[in-house]
Image (spheres, grey):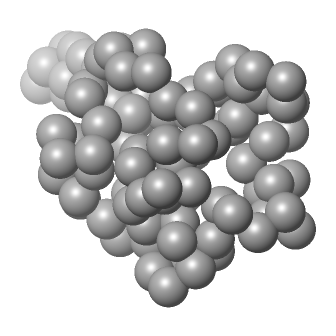
Amino acid sequence: MKKIWFFSMVLCLAAAPVSFAAVGGGDLTFKAKDAKPVFFSHIKHVEGKKYKCSACHYSVFQMAKDSYKMDMSKITKGQFCGTCHNGERSFAVSDKASCAICHK
């Protein structure tokens, strides 16, 4: 009985990092042209704001990083991050005071 319990615990601990890493997709850093890199936290959006993955994927973003060409002109026109960060649903990406929230 002790061997079964021990084996079960080892198996759970071995699988834990995989399941924790998968929650929310992790953190991403995007290189920005002529600006500091953009830091994106899935955890902040998924767990913090309680959004489901489907809120952004596939309607706003594809699942694969770098599968689209993002730039600020598209974002300020309401594409990509600008879908929500429009000053109504969340802070406006067009507001210069908001730049440092994402660009770090």
Looking at the rendering, which quadrant does residue 73 occupy?
top right
Looking at the rendering, which quadrant does residue 101 occupy?
bottom right
User: In the depicted view, which residue is nearer to us: 7 or 48?
Assistant: 48
- x%, y% of residue 95? 76, 69
Q: Residue at x 16, y 39 (%)?
A: 58
Q: Is residue 17 left or right of residue 101?
A: left
Q: Is residue 73 left or right of residue 34?
A: left
User: In the depicted view, which residue is nearer to us: 8 or 32?
Assistant: 32
Q: Is residue 28 left or right of residue 94?
A: left
User: In the depicted view, which residue is nearer to us: 62 or 77?
Assistant: 77
- x%, y% of residue 88? 50, 85
Q: Total of numbered circles in the picture? A: 0
Asked whether the viewer can see residue 68, the reply is yes
Q: Is residue 66 left or right of residue 64?
A: right
- x%, y% of residue 22? 34, 30
- x%, y% of residue 93? 65, 61
Residue 70 vs 96, above or below: the answer is above
Residue 31 vs 98, above or below: the answer is above
Q: Residue at x 52, y 71 (%)?
A: 86
Of the 4 image quadrants, the one containing the C terminus is top right
Residue 10 vs 71, above or below: the answer is above
- In the rendered image, the residue lying farthest to the bottom is 88
Residue 89 vs 62, above or below: the answer is below
Of the 4 image quadrants, the one containing the N terminus is top left
Q: Residue at x 73, y 48 (%)?
A: 102
Asked whether the viewer can see residue 9, the reply is no
